[in-house]
Image (cartoon, rainbow, N blue to C red):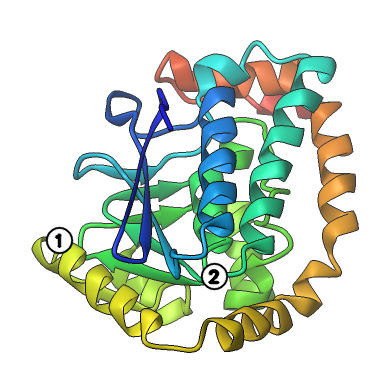
Amino acid sequence: MKFEDILYTKENGVARLIINRPDKLNSFRSLTLEELTEAFADADQDRQIGVTVLTGAGDRSFCTGGDISEMVALTPDTGLVFLRKCLRLSTTMRALTKPIIAAVNGYCLGGGHEIHLFCDLTLAAEEAVFGQVGPTVGSVPIWGGTQLLPRIVGEKRAREIVFLCQRYSAREALNFGLVNKVVPRKNLSEEVEHTARRILEMSPQALRIARLSLNFEADLLYPSFLHGVEMLKSTYGSEELKEGMTAFLEKRKPDFARFRR
């Protein structure tokens, strides 16, 4: 399988997906979403695969969310297409019959932070940085941030993460329950391999049933994702969202105060 935005390999029962856009801090565009969805689906259908690993290329970033240079030009119509691609990826990940490990090697922000929420286990390098960024660019983390995050870290902490858009160290994320383990970056691959091998020792049908059961309550929130997509797509092309995303591209602070006058 040939891809442009990701690297995909399968070996010894482990499927590895790498977001391969290090020059863009592994932000995702429409093509990235499509390729990730296809690779996850392939891993799920391969009976020889027992666990999947998702990470980012290089040593700076796991994923920093949507590529602003693409998103700034979205309209309600094209935004709906983009968000539906996001939804197809997360639905594929949630429906997988085998565990997903996120290996967070650097920045894990915005939509990238939401992608790690869809993974079963998160192993992080000491240098990893976590957080949501939506409201800083005029967007909203309705792709897991408002649904799964409160169930992982609690309501108050989730509101802090979403409303304040602060960045948190790997150790802080560990204390919040956002990640399972923090190791020195040089040991991250080894720790991921050890965890993957442990999973492969388990009964695949037992893991499949356990994953399905663990996902049950949160899967009932699927209508919230659909509603979120409809609400968020309507903001694309708005002056407020353009200000946030343009400010990001121009490396300046957005002027949201004018929208309260």
The residue that disc 1 covers is 185
Q: Residue at x 47, y 79 (%)?
A: 177
Contact check, label 2 and label 1, Cβ < 8 Å: no
Count neighbours of disc 1 (C-alpha within 10 A) and say few if under 14, some if 14 to 19, many if 20 or more: some
Q: Give the distance between the C-alpha atoms of the residues marked 2 and 1, in whole angstroms.
A: 26 Å
Q: Please, is residue 230 above or below residue 73 in the view?
A: below
Q: Please, is residue 188 above or below residue 21 in the view?
A: below
Q: Please, is residue 97 above or below residue 111 in the view?
A: below
Q: Position of residue 219 (x, y in %)?
A: 79, 68
Residue 157, numbered circle = none
In this rendering, position of residue 22 left or right of residue 114: left
Quarter-of-image position of residue 101: bottom left
Q: Is residue 55 visible?
A: yes
Q: Position of residue 58 (x, y in %)?
A: 21, 40
Quadrant occupied by the C terminus: top right
The amino acid type found where label 1 is placed reads Arg
The residue that disc 2 covers is 98
In this rendering, position of residue 37 left or right of residue 28: right
The amino acid type found where label 2 is placed reads Lys
Count neighbours of disc 2 (C-alpha within 10 A) and say few if under 14, some if 14 to 19, many if 20 or more: many
Local secondary structure at mark 2: loop
Q: Residue at x 28, y 24 (%)?
A: 23
Q: Is residue 238 visible?
A: no
- List the single residue furthest toward the front: 47
Marks 2 and 1, the one that precedes in the sequence: 2
Quarter-of-image position of residue 12: bottom left
Q: Please, is residue 82 above or below residue 53 in the view?
A: above
Q: Position of residue 105 (x, y in %)?
A: 26, 54
Local secondary structure at mark 1: helix
Which one is in front, 135 or 57?
Answer: 57
- List the single residue furthest toward the left: 186
